[in-house]
Amino acid sequence: MPSAPAPIPVPDPRPPAADGPARTLARLLSAVLAALLAAVLLPAAPAAASVGATVTHETIPGHGGIELQAKVFTPTGVEGPHPLLVMPSAWGTPNLIYVGAAHRLAHESGYQVIAYTSRGFYDSGGEIEVAGPEDRADASAVIDWALENTDADPERIGMGGISYGGGISLLTAAEDDRVRAVAALSGWTDLAASLYPDATVNEQAAELLLLAGHLTGRPGESLREMEREYRDGNIQPALDMAPDRSVATKVDDINANGTAVMLANAWNDGIFPPGQITDFYEALEGPKRLMLAPGDHATQEAFGAVGLPNEIWASLGDWFDHHLKGEANAVATEHPVHVRPNNGRGEWTTHPDWPSVTGSTETYYLDRPSTHWFRWQSSGDMEPEPATDWDYRFRTGIATTAQSGTVLLSGALQQFFDVPTGVSLPLVDRYRSAVWTSPRLPDGARVAGTPEAVFTLTPTAPDQSVFVYLYAIDGHGNGSLVSHTPHTLRDAVPGEPVTVRADLQPVVWDVPAGHRLAVVVDSKDYRYDSESRIGDRVTVTSPEQAPSQVTIPLA
């Protein structure tokens, strides 16, 4: 996709006098904290060694004349030129987010590292442009500055970052062919698929991002307009912004540049879920690596950013060492896809590609659900043969106990304490949901890949939302959420059936021996903005031409 035309340079709109004290204080605090962290993280070198790193605070000219505040980490005692790493800050964070990791990369591996605060946040100039053309031009300007003011090697340039920083890195690499390698941690590749999955607003994620933007930065006109329309129930301006800010639309440019791309995300990422990451990974044709593990947005790599030991950051270091320094390390010998089960604290497994994570699939056809409260095991069979010509209606607009959890919190509980988002299946209101359970799995199973669901729905309103949950259920009916997906019917004809084919989020999950699988469909989830209203109904049917079914990927 061709690059967007460069915008007309716009000067920083802030009055210089108004932000002078704040900027001075921010610089002072940044310098003090960076020095303290560096002192803690940098081990004392032997007397005979002179290898080390220095850190300075620099003001770097960005696109349109704004000022970007940066921490510059320069290796010492190592002959240059040095491979260059540029790291834009995450949404709502300053450049200090990377101070520990950046210092280690400079001191231990000899990288020239520049971590800068993205435009519009904290004491960097300009306004928040949501990874727009200005942000990508800023990243290229930082590269220009580094080549002019440091001993950086123009042939060995990489970019990386967490969340917003990872997204900007990918987008910049699509437009600036000087960037030879990228590591995007908890980033996005498709903004619409992340914040508007299956035509459903991810309300918790949107509100969290908007709140952080207002608290830590200055939203630009595009973001302000998008928020005004969003508050009025119009998501279209956000969808109009999304393609230019989604590297999935620029994958041909990444491939043409030959950029080496590492992607690391969490199974439970509530802001940028893993489905859009695996789709993008499969479209990449050059060197690539994919890592998926338990956690929520940025929880996998947060501690590594401050310099603590971390598997994701260690892999990032190997990635850049191989592609920028030519080291013959594990990157050259291991399979590129690394996955770790989302439960049970299992070990990493490696695979040659994403489809290889799935060894086989099993399709369960869904029979008519029951409305019995106490016989939960008979609430609609999951069978090996199609069950057709039935219908089942449930009420909408009121939540059941089946939920996808809370952004950041639920995934963190899964990662750190192996506590899943749970449900008591007998307590799921059968009059406000449809429930199915599988036969017992005597040997257990490893669900590995992307579960798929097919339903035919007949709404009573033009816009109605449904939520599909896949659970692993024990003998008492207590369930652990394996995966889920929202789906919203838009501009449907009331009374007319619509066949829905939905992909749940990818996952690797170990189902214990003797447990069952269960599928729940209801109409409200507190993570999302549901279009279902009290008084409406949804009828689930299973016609012969499209039997209701769920396909489970297995290792």
Image (cartoon, rainbow, N blue to C red):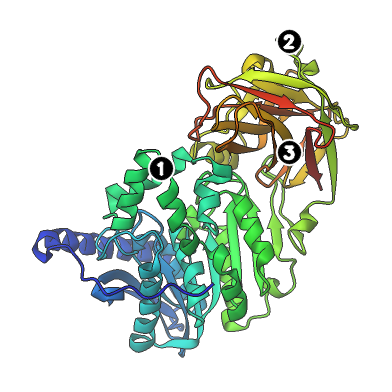
Q: Amino acid at mark 2?
A: His
Query: The N terminus appears in which quarter of the rendering?
Result: bottom right
Q: Quadrant of residue 6?
A: bottom left
Closer to the camera in the image, 200 or 68: 200
Q: Which residue is mark 2?
A: 372
Q: Residue at x 36, y 78 (%)?
A: 141
Numbered disc 3: secondary structure: strand
Q: Is residue 430 above or below residue 192?
A: above
Closer to the camera in the image, 225 or 449: 225
* Residue 108 seen in the current view: no
Q: Is residue 238 left or right of residue 467?
A: left
Q: Are marks 2 and 3 in contact (CB under 8 Å)?
A: no
Q: Earlier in the sequence, mark 2 or mark 3?
A: 2
Closer to the camera in the image, 60 or 278: 278
Q: Amino acid at mark 1?
A: Asn
Numbered disc 2: secondary structure: loop
Give how far apart the Cα atoms at labels 1 and 2 are: 40 Å
Q: Residue at x 65, y 58 (%)?
A: 279
Q: Nearer the viewer, mark 3 or mark 1?
A: 1
Residues packed near mark 2 inside 10 Å, few (<14), some (14 to 19) or many (20 plus): some
Q: Amino acid at mark 3?
A: Ala
Q: Residue at x 33, y 73 (%)?
A: 7
Q: Position of residue 478 (x, y in %)?
A: 69, 22
Q: Position of residue 29 (x, y in %)?
A: 24, 59
Q: Nearer the viewer, mark 1 or mark 2?
A: 1
Q: Residue 453, labelled with which disc? A: 3
Q: Are marks 1 and 2 in contact (CB under 8 Å)?
A: no
Q: Position of residue 273 (x, y in %)?
A: 57, 48
Q: Earlier in the sequence, mark 3 or mark 1?
A: 1
Q: Position of residue 314 (x, y in %)?
A: 58, 64
Q: Which residue is mark 1?
A: 234
